[in-house]
Image (spheres, rainbow, N blue to C red):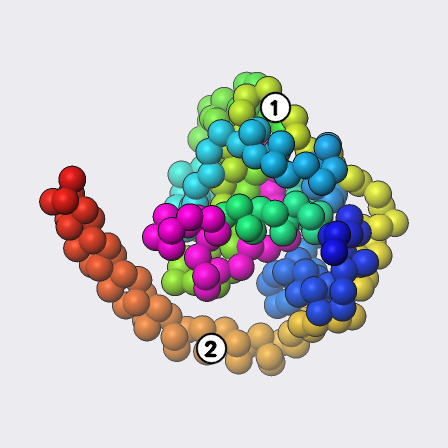
Amino acid sequence: MSIPENPLELPEDEQIKYLDGIKGYRNMVMPFEFILRLKKPWEFAGFVECIRSVWTQTDYAGLHATDPNWYEFGRYQTGILEPYLLQNFDNFLRMGKERKRVLKDDQTLTPVCYFTETPKGDGTFRDGWGGYDRQLRTDLMIPVEGGLFDHWGQYIMVDLVEGSRPFDLDCNPKLIEAIKNKAKLVGKQELTDEEWKEEFAESMRTLKEKDEAVDRYWEEQKVLWAKENEEN
């Protein structure tokens, strides 16, 4: 079965999952400006040749501490991935042995993306440190939900081969508005003030447990790395 270009044409269960993926703070639909599509439809294999590197960023606070104006001065725009691109990205990031996979079994790739056509600034904008926007940034960022580092904030970072232009930005206002309106009606509903307070309180109760789990993970990784170094 082919994957529809329009997320509103997905089967009901898949559609709700997709639309819930574009919700953020308090389950509100995130503002987005375009649908990211491949210039050559249905040719994900060809698009892979445009990827220079894929890596993860799992420290949301660090992202802003090292580059407080990453969005504005990176000239990022917020969009959503077309269903075909989302599904193939998901499959691609789960390839390989478990430890080497970019996306783990308990993680979910969201449809939301941040894209810039000028990953290296041209020096015309002043940044927050008094300098100019010449810092090299990643071309495409996709938030990830779930997994051990979910409370840190986590992103898939995609660097493209310089000069490659694999994407079209579909800015159809009627389609974008229809997607936003449908997302408000189905799946996770926007939280009331009281519901948000309860959810926040619960997250604070589990924060220590999450941090302790992260500490255990890094200790386990140190043992594995040491073992691999001995074997090599």
In this picture, residue 66 sits left or right of residue 48:
left
Q: Quadrant of the C terminus?
A: top left
Q: Residue at x 61, y 33 (%)?
A: 47
Asked whether residue 159 appears in the rendered view, the answer is yes
Asked where in the image residue 190 lies, by quadrant, the reply is bottom right
Residue nearest the viewer, comparing 153 with 66: 153
Circle 2: element type: helix
Q: Residue 142, image x and y in percent?
A: 56, 47
Q: Nearer the viewer, mark 2 or mark 1?
A: 1
User: Can residue 222 be seen at all in this image of the molecule?
Assistant: no
Instruction: Work out whether 30 lies above or below 232.
Output: below
Quarter occupied by residue 72: top right
Which residue does the numbered mark 2 point to in the structure image? 201
Q: Amino acid at mark 2?
A: Ala
* Range drawn in magenta: 94-116
Outermost residue on the front side: it is: 1
**Callout 1 crowding tier (Cα within 10 Å): few <14, some 14–19, many ≥20:** few
- Looking at the figure, which quarter contains the N terminus? bottom right
Q: Is 50 displayed left or right of 9 in the figure? A: left
Q: Quadrant of residue 44?
A: top right
Instruction: Residue 164: give its label.
Output: 1
Q: Name the residue nearer the viewer: 137 or 222.
A: 222
Q: Secondary structure at mark 1?
A: loop
Residue displayed at 80% across by 64% down: 182
The amino acid pointed to by label 1 is Ser
Q: Position of residue 105 (x, y in %)?
A: 46, 61
Q: Where in the figure is residue 17, as x and y percent of width and height?
A: 66, 65
Q: Is residue 125 magenta?
A: no
Pick whichever of labels 2 and 1 is earlier in the sequence.
Answer: 1
Q: Residue at x 62, y 32 (%)?
A: 46
